[in-house]
Image (cartoon, rainbow, N blue to C red):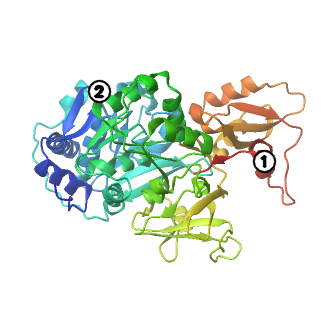
Amino acid sequence: MSTPSATTLAGLVRELGATRPDAPAVTLGDTTRTFGDLDARSSRVARALQAVGVAAGDRVGVLDKNAPTFYEVVFGAAKIGAVTVGLNFRLAAPEVAAIVADAAPRVVVVDPEFAHLLPADGPTVVQLGEEYEAWLSDDASDPGHEPEPDDVVLQLYSSGTTGNPKGAMLTSANLMWTPRMGREFYGMGPDTVNLVPSPLFHIGGTGYSLTALGQGGHTVLVRDMDPAAVLGLIERHRVTHTFLVPAVVQMLAESPALAGTDTSSLQRIAYGAAPMGETQLLKAIALFGCDFMGVYGMTETAGTVVCLAPEDHDPGGPRAHLLRSVGKPLPWLDVRVVDPATGEDAPVGGVGEIWVRSGQNTVGYWGQPGLTAETLVEGGWLRTGDAAYFDGEGYLYMHDRIKDMVVSGGENVYPAEVENVLYAHPDVLEAAVIGVPSDRWGETVKAVVVRRPGSGVTQPDLIAFVRDRLAHYKCPTSIDFADELPRNASGKVLKKVLREPFWVGSTRKVN
């Protein structure tokens, strides 16, 4: 098969539907959609959306665990110029409502399991299953809309540092770098079988999956994280590639099912999106016996921008120190480390903020021109908010986060959002949220709380309070009580001081 020449998502599914109609595109359980199926069913979605008044530029939401229908909606919406909004099923109802209010989708396609998360007075809802199948148009003809590469096709959300939702807008031009990434760095092609456990509302799910799917390869979806079942998928489908957050790498490596599972088909495991311990990485390399590749990227860069290649994984060798690096920038983009004090490039070994200039960069945040202007600066650079340094060979080492974001099991948690909930408790005088090491999740959320005088509020009380209001992965797993919080002369809480005792001596690799 020749490399697809399409420049848009709509063009991609049309081209693959024509050139590989019978090849498997996406599998979940016993259901497989071929590229011909995906092309035809996405056209039926497009026609159904048109029938309820969805037009170019409108938003369409998807609230579900991983399923082939996500791609049907993404490609179907793209065929009429609409934008798919990935909604996080792990969020609490008020969080989903805030994103729905911000994105204002005309239609939300939802699994019945998560329908209760949607606001009652929200958009038109189509429930997956019989209702969705009946809603699909009987007309499978392509609507014929020809989008431009710079048209927005995907809007993915994460909470901002203030706790407010922010929707990063990605175009076809941003996402169509991903198949090239798959060819040149992931070692993929049309014969690839790619396992996708990361949720499709994340760039690590939908963006990563385009590495193989965009070349006509086969994508195998994981709906629920059961280590034994995932290992079974690898054996059953002869999976060749996957991207795993470190917590999942550890789950698979420690699963009793691994010893009895044939994983010899695996060619490459990419890992990233969360801290990775060197001991954990070395154990996985020994157990799986395939290539490992470290990656660094973010939603705003449509995925990977820095890669630690398999040949740079040299445990026990003279270049073993590179395992602490996230690698080198991809050749079609530019990465700087900028000293925030001077605005100039930091010297070798000097810590600064990572800036990226790339065709992968988001065009901005939906409805937030101020935040967009802070993030996308003169010269085409995107400010990541992450801190790092370059060594003399051009390898990038993560140092810390300029933003105080906690990455737990591949999920981004913004302390301000959690702190806002804690402050709503009547017995909380002050609160600071930090990330601390976790063997399972890389990092986990800890809160340090100053009680109001006379209060006897306990750790379980506060954890339960937060869990009623936020997704569980955002909630503190432990709470320390203090008489006061450390602050600098201007009154700012010194989170570095709070974090330091927990991270001293840690060899964990931060991505």
Image location of residue 330, percent across then percent down: 44, 64
The amino acid marked with disc number 1 is: Glu
Relative image position of residue 391 (x, y in whole percent): 62, 67
Side of 383 where 100 appears, left or right:
left
Q: Are marks 2 and 1 in contact (CB under 8 Å)?
A: no
Q: Is residue 45 above or below residue 489?
A: above
Crowd around label 2: few <14 · some 14–19 · many ≥20 (10 Å): few
The correct choice, above or below, for 431 with respect to 376 in the image is above
Residue type, mark 2 in image: Gly
x, y percentage for residue 267? Answer: 36, 44
Q: Residue at x 47, y 73 (%)?
A: 380
Q: Nearer the viewer, residue 347 or 207?
A: 347
Q: To which residue does mark 1 refer?
A: 500
Task: Mark 2 or mark 1: name the one nearer the start of the chain.
Answer: 2
- Seen from this angle, which residue lies furthest front? 317
Q: Secondary structure at mark 1?
A: helix
**Residue closest to the eye, 214 or 98:** 214
Using residue 411 as the reference point, say whether residue 171 is left or right of it: left
